[in-house]
Image (cartoon, rainbow, N blue to C red):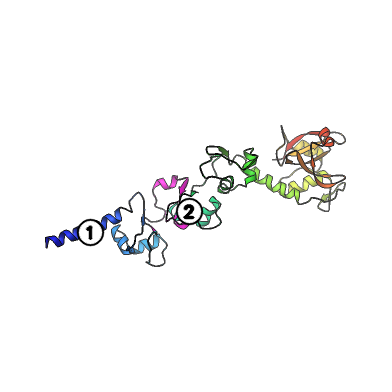
Amino acid sequence: MRKQLLTIAASTGLFITAFSGNASAHENNYQVRSGDTLWKIAQANHLSINQLIEWNSLSTSVIYPGQSISLIEPHTHEQTDADVMSYTVKTGDRLWEIARKFNLQIQELKDRNGLTSDTIYPGQKLMIKHTESLSTYTVQSGDTLWLIASRHNLSITQLKSMNNLSSDTIVVGQVLKLSSTSAAASKVDALIIEAKKYMGVPYKWGGSTPVAFDCSGYLNYVFNNVGISIPRTVATIWDATKTVSAPQVGDIVFFNTSSGPSHAGIYLGNNQFIHSGSSTGVTISDMNVSYWKSRYLGARTAF
């Protein structure tokens, strides 16, 4: 009889150890092993089967080895989870489980990390916490410019422009600007896209529609279409905008073709600007060409 009791006690001890070795108050999850049932997991952790089913969004009580089972009710994670900025994927992790752990929707987690599918792999680093309030980001091992841009709802062009990058190459430890000009950068992208829509539209004095533009009519139309109101003539646009020391993409560059500011276009970068020329219509020109270089007055911004 004593031998039987010892055997039972030992078996019980082994049973408890098997569960306690894989789940704790700090981990809040249990990794299913071969032979486990939902009932056994519930009993070992003083829970009901219904709680486990509800907390893990299970449609049945069927579980399988390697599956991660949450042992706590959603939205009751410890404070450390709320402070987590990123999460490194472990073997057996699934995207929906990570999303649930940090109280996120799956699509929200995918959007933050630029994911186009639910596929993840061990060692992959996922952005967890909202980063809209961050103004900088320090590059970590495995980061790419595309991934950082996707995590922070930016385009690669915006990120490169904000950080004066000439290539997509970044290095671990590099600090990148993120949000100081993100809203303006989005508006600039929209402005350039809008401006290029009208390439080839002919020039006409007084023209202010896509049928034909003069230079200021073109600027007025394009800026208004992206929600930025500017005056109708070059001289009044000059007066209404702010001086900048050097043109940035989206700024307005001005030229003296008659008397004072009399022609203008939108700066595209690399000394190029888009404008409606009297002999060309809407086109892209090089500011280094002697005609424009000798008549350049300066740059101003409407942002």
Q: Secondary structure at mark 2?
A: loop
Residue type pointed to by label 1: Thr
Query: Picture coordinates of residue 212 (x, y %)?
Result: 84, 51
Q: Secondary structure at mark 1?
A: helix
Please report whichever mark, 1 or 2, sits nearer to the chain's N-terminal start.
1
Q: In the image, is residue 225 part of the stretch drawn in magenta?
A: no
> Where, quadrant-wise, is the N terminus in this rendering?
bottom left
43 vs 135, left or right, is left
Disc 1: CA contacts within 10 A as few (<14), some (14-19) or many (>=20): few
70 vs 127, left or right, is left
Q: Point out which mark residue 121 bears.
A: 2
In the image, is residue 160 above or below residue 7?
above
Residue type pointed to by label 2: Tyr
Residue for point 74% across, 48% down: 224
Query: Picture coordinates of residue 277 (x, y %)?
Result: 84, 44
Residue for point 60% across, 41% down: 169
> Where, quadrant-wise, is the C terminus in this rendering?
top right
Along the line of sight, which residue is nearer the eye, 179 or 142?
A: 142
Q: Which residues are magenta?
A: 68-97
Along the line of sight, which residue is nearer the eye, 59 or 18?
A: 18
In the image, is residue 124 above or below residue 50?
above
Along the line of sight, which residue is nearer the eye, 250 or 174?
A: 174
Residue 188, by quadrant, is top right
Query: Picture coordinates of residue 140 (x, y %)?
Result: 51, 41
Q: Which residue is mark 1?
A: 12
Disc 2: CA contacts within 10 A as few (<14), some (14-19) or many (>=20): some
